[in-house]
Structures are given as structure tokens and as C-alpha cells.
Amino acid sequence: MAFFTPNEIVDLIVMTVAIGYIFSKIFGTPQSDDYDPLKHYKKIGF
């Protein structure tokens, strides 16, 4: 039978969050080829 101590559970949670943060930028949404970053500011009127 496997027993987990509270310290091991906290370590697992911390490692999962850290690894998720590290790899969060890799799996981003792809932008289209005709993306214009200034389009947003043209709508606002800057």
C-alpha cells in the first residue's frame, strides 16, 4: 500500500505548478499570418 506524507503531496503540487508555468508559453495559440499588432490601437484612437 502506498502512503503519502503531507510534505510529499505539497511537493507534488508545487512541482506540477512550476512545470506548468515553465511550459505554458510553448503551447500557446498560434497567430494568423495577417496579424497586425497596431490594429488594436487604431480602434482606440491613439
Image (cartoon, grey):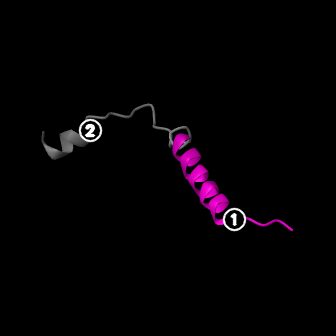
Count of picture labels: 2
The amino acid at mark 2 is: Lys
Q: At 65% across and 62% down in the image, what residue appears?
A: 9
* Range covered by the magenta-colored residues: 1-22
The amino acid at mark 1 is: Thr
Residue on which the image places disc 1: 5
**Placement of the N terminus among the 4 image quadrants:** bottom right
Q: Please tell me whether residue 1 is drawn above or below residue 35 in the rendered image.
A: below
SS assignment for the magenta stretch, majority = helix
Closer to us: 18 or 41: 18
Residue on which the image places disc 2: 39
In this view, the residue farthest toward the left is 46
Query: Nearer the observer, disc 1 or disc 2?
Result: 1
Q: CA distance from mark 1 to mark 2?
A: 53 Å
Could you classify mark 2 by the number of other residues whose Cα lies within 10 Å: few (under 14), some (14-19), or many (20 or more)?
A: few
Element under disc 1: loop
In the rendered structure, does residue 5 fall within the stretch colored magenta? yes
Closer to us: 46 or 1: 1
Element under disc 2: helix
Q: Is residue 7 left or right of residue 41?
A: right
Q: At 20% across and 45% down in the image, what residue appears?
A: 43
